[in-house]
Image (cartoon, rainbow, N blue to C red):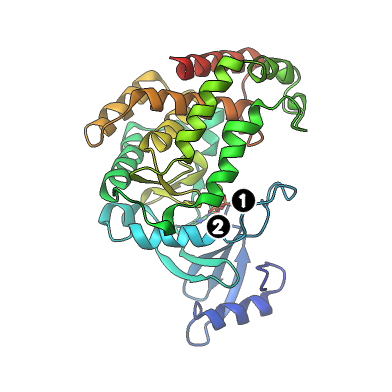
Amino acid sequence: MFILSANDIATLETYLQNQGWLINGERVSQVSVPGEGNMNYVLRITTADRSFIVKQSRGYVEKYPHVSAPADRVLMEGVFYKTTSVDRLIADFTPELIGIDPVNNVMALEDLGTASDFIPLYNSLKALEITQVAQLTDFLSTLHTRFSCESPPDSLKNKAMRALNHQHIFEYPFMKENGFDLDTVQPGLQAVATVYKSDDELKTQVAHLGQTYLSDGKCLLHGDFYPGSWLDTTQGIKIIDPEFCFYGPAEFDLGVMIAHLHLAGQNKAMVDFTLDRYSSINQINYNSLNGFIGIEIIRRLIGLAQLPLQRTLQQKQQLLRFARTLIMS
Ligand SMILES: Nc1ncnc2c1ncn2[C@@H]1O[C@H](COP(=O)(O)OP(=O)(O)O)[C@@H](O)[C@H]1O
Ligand SMILES: [Mg+2]
């Protein structure tokens, strides 16, 4: 098995040549890390005339090596890009697929440039513009409608990744003893979370939402549509990292996006704008939507996949109460 590494350029170069990703004696001049990721090992390869991105998935989560994950998940991204690139709008929003190595779970992608993601939104270091929200919404509504079908292809069911996400979104945050001390995130957060971990009414609703998430649906979803998957490039917003893609309920993607607008403190007008614009293209089931918005807010506050949120305990409590209301409404 080839292990992608920035430390041994000679081996890396031979590997890239063997894959046909370097052409005509092209040499690697630089290897760097393009930006912070969570799940996978990602490098930018620079040669004399160009650069491209290579990404390898492994049997564990890069940021949390004790958490295991499907080793071949990068192949799902490959299937997503291959499937969706036939649509002009989606192709314009996403990097071009250069190649896939299914033996070693490596993918090569067009380099979208030294862009930052939208993670700084959580600290108000970056405000979203209405045109950007429009772009994000159009990406989703196009993806959801353009590739919709009654019986989803097996190649895009992504059951293993869905099972992993299901655990982290719908189960883990509500377990009383899950080995994650939330006071290490913020003193007092564990006690705040205990209220929700003991809330059986809420947990019943969350279990239903979890089943909806696990059921196959008609729309192709990105599956992880949050600011970490949005890149702010000189060519406008680009979308990356569809490893959690699957055929499911459109409201899951839309719910995640709106949850993060709330988590990033964006105003209600932004949320209403998103809903108006999306609903002019695709129908929304508001009951599921509210549920998915609520659960994403809760799991980001009391689950393992924490965000760099600068919020007081009181503000987090307020968000949690709001999220609960959405789920129970
Ligand atoms: N095609 C690309 N062009 C430019 N930068 C990229 C590209 N793909 C990834 N990156 C950078 O690498 C980071 C990690 O990539 P990502 O696909 O999100 O990995 P992970 O699955 O580990 O989250 C991104 O946040 C981004 O900064
Ligand atoms: Mg990512």
Amino acid under label 1?
Met
Query: Is ligand 1 less than 8 Å from the beta carbon at label 1?
Result: yes
Residue lying at 47% horizontally and 64% vertically, measured from the top left: 109
Judging by the rendered image, the residue that carries numbered circle 2 is 73
Q: Position of residue 214 (x, y in %)?
A: 48, 40
Q: Position of residue 106 (x, y in %)?
A: 56, 67
Quadrant of the rendered structure where residue 42 is?
Answer: bottom right
Helix, strand or loop at mark 1: loop
Judging by the rendered image, the residue that carries numbered circle 1 is 39
Observer-nearest of 215 and 300: 215
One can see residue 124 in this view: no
The first of marks 2 and 1 along the sequence is 1
Instruction: Specify the farthest residue to the left.
Output: 280
Quadrant of the rendered structure where residue 91 is?
Answer: bottom left
Q: Quadrant of the C terminus?
A: top left
For the residues labelled 2 and 1, the Cα–Cα distance comes to 10 Å
Q: Position of residue 129 (x, y in %)?
A: 37, 33
Q: Is residue 192 above or below residue 134?
A: above
